[in-house]
Image: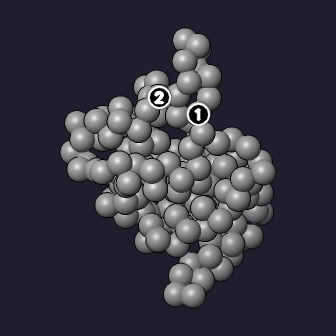
Amino acid sequence: MRYSRQNKIIELINSYEIDTQEKLASMLRENGFEVTQATISRDIKDLQLVKTLSSSGKYKYALNKSKDMPVSDRFVKIFRETITSFAASGNLIVVKTLSGCAAAAGEAIDNSGLPHIIGSIAGDNTLLLIADSTEAIPEIMQEFQDMLQMRGK
């Protein structure tokens, strides 16, 4: 439920100018998520959201695009807790996730700095990754396998 909720938060802040925790909580409730202020605060911290100036001149929540943030830690955690399987064909990798988690996993991958991944397309529980070459696929797949093996640790 947490990853589905956090995925919805990412979707909401990318679609609307949300400037307060109260507004975010209200929009989550409208989308079927019962949340408290404490839950919203934890989610904001987990997602490393920041307030940025919007085009309308107001501040709004946004994903932190800073390269100084430990995005790779977040990526590893999301990957280990939501990925159910992955397979490659050519320069494409199909990643299966828990329901509602593909977009969050895709966002984490896109911001992780993993070499050779040039983009992703996410559905509800399926993520398509595009690698820069077929030669890079074994390296990417091994990286994913190594992260999954850390799951129980």
Q: Position of residue 143 (x, y in %)?
A: 69, 72
Q: Please report the residue visible at 60 percent of the width from the left and 61 percent of the height from the top.
A: 74
Q: Please report the residue visible at 67 percent of the width from the left and 56 percent of the height from the top.
A: 71
Q: Is 145 displayed left or right of 101 in the figure?
A: right
**Label ID, residue 140:** none
Residues 85 and 135: in front is 85
Q: Which residue is mark 1?
A: 51
Judged from the image, the secondary structure of the residue bearing numbered disc 2 is: loop
Q: Is 124 displayed left or right of 72 in the figure?
A: left
Q: Taking 17 as reference, is 126 above or below it? A: below
Q: Quadrant of the N terminus?
A: bottom left
Q: Taking 56 as reference, is 71 above or below it? A: below
Q: Residue furthest bottom?
A: 153
**Label ID, residue 19:** 2
Residues 12 and 24: in front is 24
Residue type highlighted by circle 1: Lys
**CA neighbours of label 1 inside 10 A, class few (<14), some (14 to 19), many (20+):** some
Q: Please report the residue visible at 62 percent of the width from the left and 71 percent of the height from the top.
A: 144
Question: Earlier along the polypeptide chain: callout 2 or callout 1?
Answer: 2
Q: Residue furthest top?
A: 56
Residue type highlighted by circle 2: Asp
**CA neighbours of label 2 inside 10 A, class few (<14), some (14 to 19), many (20+):** some
Judged from the image, the secondary structure of the residue bearing numbered disc 1 is: strand
Please report contact status of discs 2 and 1: CB closer than 8 Å, yes or no: yes
Q: Please report the residue visible at 56 percent of the width from the left and 44 percent of the height from the top.
A: 49
Q: CA distance from mark 2 to mark 1?
A: 8 Å
